[in-house]
Image (cartoon, helix red, strand yellow):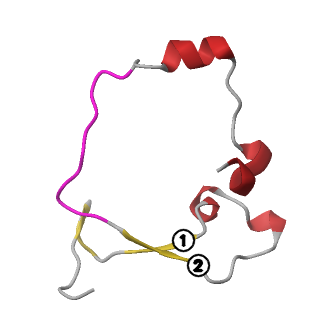
Amino acid sequence: MRSLVGDRLPNFTAQETSDLRGSYDILGLNYYGAYYAKNLTRVDPDPTHLRYATDSHVNVTGKLTIKFIIIYEIGR
């Protein structure tokens, strides 16, 4: 991840890491929908286009049919 995001990925001190470890109260999982991700064969080389949506170097697809629920056609 550091090689893709570089300096935009934050660094945590040892104390911050210790404070965060095990600190969540609940972990939710949305099992009503999902996204598919496909590796990009060509990555945009323009450094001004770097952002959260492009950091993963994947094309994310889905079909939104109901607000907040993603449904996929059979065979896709």
- Which stretch appears magenta? 24-34
Pick the front one: 38 or 50: 38
- Residue in the picture at 64% in, 50% down: 1
- Residue in the picture at 36% in, 23% down: 24
Note whether 25 is above or below 6 in the view shown: above
The image shows residue 26 at horizontal and vertical percentages of 27, 27
Q: Which residue is mark 1?
A: 58
Q: Is residue 38 left or right of residue 14?
A: left
* Picture quadrant of residue 63: bottom left
Q: Which residue is mark 2?
A: 40
* Picture quadrant of residue 33: bottom left
Q: Farthest residue to the bottom: give it.
A: 75
Instruction: Rate crowding at label 1 as few (under 14), some (14 to 19) or many (20 or more) other CA atoms within 10 Å.
Output: some
At label 1, which amino acid type do we have?
Val
- Residue in the picture at 70% in, 47% down: 2
Q: Is residue 29 left or right of residue 11?
A: left
Q: Is residue 14 left or right of residue 30?
A: right
The image shows residue 31 at horizontal and vertical percentages of 18, 55
Q: What main secondary structure does the magenta stretch of the protein show?
A: loop
* Picture quadrant of residue 37: bottom left
Q: CA distance from mark 2 to mark 1?
A: 5 Å
Q: Secondary structure at mark 2?
A: loop
- The image's mark for residue 13 is none
The image shows residue 40 at horizontal and vertical percentages of 59, 78
Asked if the residues shown at circle 2 and circle 1 are in contact, with their CB atoms under 8 angstroms apart, the answer is yes
Instruction: Rate crowding at label 2 as few (under 14), some (14 to 19) or many (20 or more) other CA atoms within 10 Å.
Output: few
